[in-house]
Image (cartoon, helix red, strand yellow):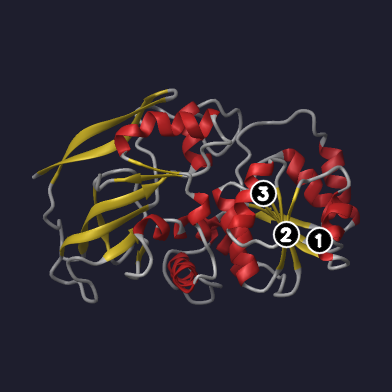
Amino acid sequence: MVSGRRVAFTGRQTAVTEPFDFDPTPAHEHELVFETLVSAISSGTELASYTNDQDIGHWEGEPYPVRPGYAAVGRVIALGDAIDGWTEGDVAFVQRGHGSHHRADVRHDLLVKAPATVPPEDAVYVRFCAVSMTTLVTTVARPGDGVAVFGLGIVGSTAAQVFQASGYEVVAFDPVPARRAVVEACGVRHAAAPDADIHAAWAALVGDTPCRLVLDTSGSAAAVQSAVELADIGAEIALIGVHWKSDPTRPMAALLQPVFTKYLTIRSGWEHRLPTRHTAFTPGNKTNVMRHAMALLERGEIDVRPLRSHLLPPDHAQSAYQGLLNRRDDYFSVVFDWTS
């Protein structure tokens, strides 16, 4: 038995690091045991449970304590007898929370090895790339088509890069200049403010290329209204960001009229549409798209380094979440370093 640490929300806007006992022996023959190197905060999802003040969404508040997170990179310290293709010392992404130790079942869990050339603090971002890559493998839009991304948090910023690397003409929209600067530092060619004349903002960057796909990663009704205005006839709009709060200033008629008159398709962009592993007749799976994201990182076709504003020890969890909540110009993305 070893003494572990993990992040917990014990109440609204209260994050602590708590101890727990961890048995590093594999519980069965298909289990990997990891010592965590880094874990990354998913700002939207985790701040929703940290603040617990959403008025709509896919849960009705959180019972505390909450142990957040779903993106970690760890080193294998033990493995079951039936496991092939893994050895002690392997470094991999594992879909687990903010804790010093984890275990995973190679038959079912989401696991992707990290090459030695990709630092763990970069490799952990494949989790956020995968969010939009569900739409990448299911959309009817094709390379060369115009794609608009609304909202440039971690998910939007990685989405813009992934779609650009896949051959699409991408324009990334966000009202905050600092966020546009970050995505440009990552190598995204076109970023703009979602001005009142969204068509003019689009045309100034990509000319007469029509917008065939919109990714809304913001969870904002205002962004969806801009999306239906910008989208070309017959285009798709994928809702990737969760609408945690209602917006009574946006009447439904204003949103739905263009959907009807332009034959638009608005659909869920939730990543869990794809299975974790390969399944017959399914267009892709989460493991495969995450492996592809890791390959893009290794080849330098996407760059996540400008996204990471803070690399902190987990004992700084409270200041990290407060920074992401209240100091958004300074805190863009936080990664916990469990080796510190």
Residue neighbourhood size for the residue with mark 3, other residues' Cα within 10 Å, grouped as few (<14), some (14–19), many (≥20): many
The three-letter code of the residue at mark 1 reads Leu
Q: Where in the figure is residue 193, as x and y percent of width and height?
A: 76, 46
Find the distance from the CA under tag 1 to the CA under tag 3: 14 Å
Identify which amino acid the numbered label 2 is placed on: His
Q: Secondary structure at mark 3?
A: helix
Q: Nearer the viewer, residue 168 or 270?
A: 168
Cα separation, mark 3 vs mark 2, equals 9 Å
Q: Which residue is mark 2?
A: 190
Q: First in sequence, mark 1 or 2: give its number.
A: 2
Q: Residue furthest left?
A: 1
* Residue under pointer 3: 180
Please tell me how crowded label 2 is: few (under 14), some (14-19), or many (20+) other residues with Cα within 10 Å.
many
Residue 143 seen by the camera: yes
Task: Please provide percent x and percent y for residue 299.
Answer: 48, 74
The residue identified by callout 1 is 205
Q: Which mark is residue 309?
A: none
Say if 260 sits above or below 213 in the image. above
Relative placement, left or right, of 47 versus 164 is left
Q: Are marks 1 and 2 in contact (CB under 8 Å)?
A: yes
Q: Residue at x 41, y 29 (%)?
A: 319
SS at circle 2: loop
Q: Residues within 10 Å of mark 1 (few under 14, many from 20)?
A: some
Residue 10: give x, y in percent of width and height.
35, 25
Please report whichever mark, 1 or 3, sits nearer to the chain's N-terminal start.
Answer: 3
Quadrant containing the N terminus is: top left
- The secondary structure type at the circle numbered 1 is helix
Distance between mark 1 and mark 2 Cα atoms: 7 Å
Count of picture labels: 3
Write down the quadrant of residue 266 in the picture. Answer: bottom right
